[in-house]
Image (tube, helix red, strand yellow):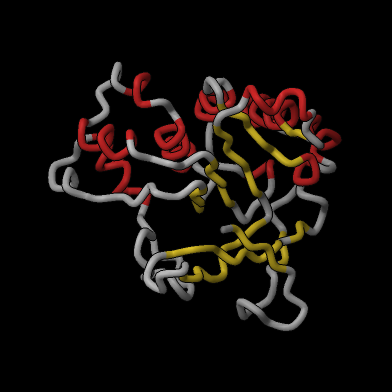
Amino acid sequence: DRLLEIPGENLENVLAAKDLVSLYNGVPGYQDLKVNLDTDTVTVVGIGNVALDVVRMLLTPVDVLRKTDTTEAWLEQLAASRVERVVVVGRRGPLHVSFTIKELRELVKLEGTRSVVRATDMAGVKEALASVARPRKRLTELLLKTAVGPQDPATEERWRREWQLRLFRSPLELLPGADGRSVGSIVLGVNRAADGGRSDGHRGAGGAPHGPGATLDRLQ
């Protein structure tokens, strides 16, 4: 529930994960929360278990969730959702994600949903596995297995939805959409680990959102 402390954070439809989790878990006081899901893409900032749980709740079909204890308030909103892609953004590399293998496995196995872990974000990680503790090693091996290169067009029809993991990315600015009030896109700084992703060392994209020498990425 921490603030990002970046420009545009007060735009409409920028939500704290805690609020959304409280809505679908039935926490009193949150059942009237309205979430605008009239979009094809959602960005989730953070690489912990809560972030992956939010992804799962956004992409799991309503008919599947009806068999769980998810609230009717969330199911009604999800039934009208246009969301087809969720992008998970984290500033650290693959050896420092905070989610567990259980949460990752649930997403990887989610029916009709493609998991996209970029091979470039996993560069040098395989060579570092020998010195990684067993629980972290198993998690990292699943990330490596999930990492994808160019997709085979013949398999595209299998996927109705997808989630992407974008590592080494820090949110710098939220930009308004066409209405000038709601969030329309997010500007990301590209971090570079000092040792190819094996440690937590990283260099940010510059002090200002569009500062000199900044390497930027943008999601809409």
Q: Nearer the viewer, residue 79 or 147?
A: 79
Residue drawn at (86%, 35%) of the image: 127
Estimate the x, y position of residue 89 in percent, counting from the top left.
58, 51
How far from the left and from the top, in percent, is residue 211?
68, 82
Most extreme residue toward the left, as rendered?
Answer: 28
Q: Residue at x 57, y 38 (%)?
A: 163
User: Is residue 171 depicted above or below 96 in this figure?
Assistant: below
Q: Is residue 205 visible?
A: yes
Q: Is residue 101 above or below residue 99?
A: above
Position of residue 153 in the picture relative to residue 9 (left or right): right
Viewer-side residue, 154 vs 67: 154
Along the viewing direction, whichever of 150 and 70 lies nearer the viewer? 150
Q: Position of residue 217 (x, y in %)?
A: 68, 63
Looking at the figure, which quarter contains the C terminus? bottom right
Q: Can residue 134 be seen here?
A: no
Identify the image quadrant of the N terminus. bottom left
Q: Quadrant of residue 139?
A: top right
**Residue 191 in which image quadrant:** bottom right
- Residue 22 relative to residue 113: left or right: left
Which residue is at a point 28% across and 32% down the rendered structure image?
75
